[in-house]
Image: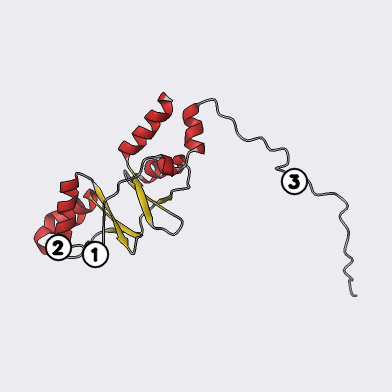
Amino acid sequence: MSEEFVPTRVTEEFTDPLQNYDPKTYNDPLEKALADEKVAAIQSTPVATVTPDTPVHAAVAMLARLKVSCLLVVKDGKLVGVFSDRDVLDRVALDYDQVKDRPVGKLMTTDPVFVYETDSAAAALSIMAVSGFRHVPVTDIEQKVVGIVSPQRVAEFLRRQVLE
């Protein structure tokens, strides 16, 4: 017994669900800023960078000299890692004499979590809160470093939103 396929015609017209879409309204200006402002609105420059072949001793000296807690590791302008004070404590401090001349690329945190400059400010804060990172690299769409989000820069962004 052979069943023959008989197409049926749908007579109902398509209705666009976004046709009557009203954008979200916010009662709190801070909530609105976090949703509407982009990461680029958080002052994210300057940023300290090194290359993967930078010796560990030079990277540690740079952290101290600049009084920063992390360096973005870039190759051809693209983010490849992060070398932070946490890396120094976990991977360098106890074995400094053995690792000081090794390239930072061997001891950095690889595959760093980052945000795009076009992501919402809330996305950067979410990564900081959920992942526990104090510093979040900011890249463009091609993953070229354009900045970094830090607690101080977030605090300044929030202060501006509240005072304006």
Name the side, left or right, on which 8 lies relative to 52: right
Instruction: Say whether residue 126 is visible.
Output: no
* Residue, disc 1: 106
Q: Are marks 2 and 3 in contact (CB under 8 Å)?
A: no
Determine the CA span between mark 2 and mark 3: 61 Å
Badge 1, how many Cα within 10 Å: few under 14, some, many 20+? Answer: some
Quarter that holds the N terminus: bottom right
The amino acid marked with disc number 3 is: Asp
Image position, residue 105 (x, y; %)? 25, 63
Which residue is label 2 attached to? 99
Q: Which residue is mark 3?
A: 16
The answer to whether mark 1 and mark 2 are in CB contact below 8 A is: yes
In the current view of this chain or complex, which residue is farthest to the bottom?
Answer: 1
**Near-viewer residue (41 or 21):** 41
- Label 2, secondary structure: give it: helix
- The residue closer to the viewer here, 134 or 66, is 66
- Mark 2 and mark 3 lie on one chain; the one further toward the N terminus is 3
> CA gap, disc 3 to disc 1?
53 Å
- Amino acid type of the residue that numbered disc 1 sits on in the rendered structure: Lys
Q: Quadrant of the C terminus?
A: top left
Q: Nearer the viewer, mark 3 or mark 1?
A: 3
